[in-house]
Image: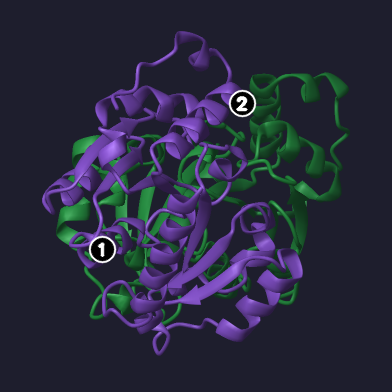
Chain colours: A green, B purple
Amino acid sequence: MKVNLQEDVLKDHNLAAKYNREIFRGNQTLVINLMSSPGAGKTTLLEETVKALAKDFSIAVIEGDLATDRDAERLRALGIKTVQINTVGGCHLDARMVAKTLPEFDLDDINILFIENIGNLVCPSGYDLGQHHKVVILSVPEGNDKIPKYPVMFRRTNMTIINKIDLLPYVSFDVEEAKKDLEAINPEAQFKTLSARTGEGMEEWINWIKDAYSECAKQ
Amino acid sequence: MKVNLQEDVLKDHNLAAKYNREIFRGNQTLVINLMSSPGAGKTTLLEETVKALAKDFSIAVIEGDLATDRDAERLRALGIKTVQINTVGGCHLDARMVAKTLPEFDLDDINILFIENIGNLVCPSGYDLGQHHKVVILSVPEGNDKIPKYPVMFRRTNMTIINKIDLLPYVSFDVEEAKKDLEAINPEAQFKTLSARTGEGMEEWINWIKDAYSECAKQ
């Protein structure tokens, strides 16, 4: 089903989020909103995730960036339908921007849509895009103190992924402390550690997405 | 000289920036606004910078964070007068917040004031705090593509520091490409590479600050 964009949706964030959510539900498309600081590895994680899922699922991506379509090109190189949103200075995506891109996808043919948000550990957390899951990626070189220091993001997301665990020998990062800090802020949140680059821990993340898809397709 | 805060300054960003600038000039206090993504190493760089400068200069720090005073405590542990600003969700400091802290310092006894901004590669770039220099720190694990992807920050800063060069053997980061990308966006900007952790490249940065202080004290 091709989406016809309703004009009034573009006037209101909450309406747009609701509209997106209904469209995703109607098409049984699982939608995951990926957030992190710049350089925490969202695009690399997405590339490896797509490679692991592409034989069983039809996947699409919305790429948010201030400027350039470099990340979109990386996903397109894997044969994935990718729509780029350039915010030209804006520090987060919003539901209206996402709604505008939906007519470009054949959503009833898409099982999983990933939205890569702007690299920012502050602004994107407050914006509901209509997604099923909000996932925040914290990379090992950033330091485990980022969870208490940026609590809003970690409180408002369903899952925290600690990425780049291959760098643990070279920098100071206490995984157990990160886990405890997350539990204190958001006891319901899931916590996973992985390295998108080496593949360590990827299987658990991929299985979680598969389960989330089954859950979404049931509804 | 103790600063008496003028109430009208708090109503207008531009007025506050001008006010701060005049106060800094009147006290011959060099002010450096440090910006970066979360976890790029601002506080560690600041600790090492303070250690290198403290025997010759009187130093103070304004620490910006969404939450916690962990970073301020790290600087206070070095005997440095540090005032914490918690923005409680706000993604950048502004000149009014800085103006409000000034009565807490004896500025005529302070040679160099560092302002550590909120960890964010987008929002802080647009806000003039009245500083002499805006310095952005990009850390090696973030990847060299961040300069073209977050151009506004790199265009609006006087200096780009590539930090954590001790991690160059373990991650993909092209220093020459970063330098070229910066030159394309901001040909006037200075470019330095260092590791605050190992000390490599620190001397050049410290010398640059000393020169900047001499320049500021002349005026």
Residue B46, position as x, y percentages in the image: 30, 58
Image height check: is B80 above or below B205? above
Residue occupying image coordinates x 18% and y 47%:
B80
Same chain shared by disc 2 and disc 1: yes
Which residue is at the front of the view, B186 or A62?
Answer: B186
Front position in the image: B20 or A32: B20
The one nearer the camera, B46 or B21, is B21
Q: Earlier in the sequence, mark 2 or mark 1?
A: 2
Numbered badge on residue A172: none
Q: Is residue B188 at all visible to an observer of this figure? A: yes
Residue B14: image tag: 2
The residue at which mark 1 appears reads as B53
Task: Specify few, some or many for label 1: CA neighbours under 10 Å numbering under 14, 14-19, or 20 or more.
Answer: some
Q: Amino acid at mark 2?
A: Asn
Q: Quadrant of residue A187?
A: top left
Q: Position of residue B5 (x, y in %)?
A: 39, 16
Q: Camera-side residue: A205 or B211? A: B211
Three-letter amino acid code at disc 1?
Answer: Leu
Secondary element under disc 2, as helix, strand or loop, is helix
Image quadrant where one finds the N terminus of chain B = top left
Indicate left or right for A10 with A164 as reference. Answer: right
Residue A67 appears at what percent x and percent y? 73, 56
Residue drawn 35% across and 77% down?
A: B203
B114 lies left or right of A211: left
| Nearer the camera: disc 2 or disc 1 | 1
Q: Are marks 2 and 1 in contact (CB under 8 Å)?
A: no
Letter of the chain that mark 1 sits on in the rendering: B
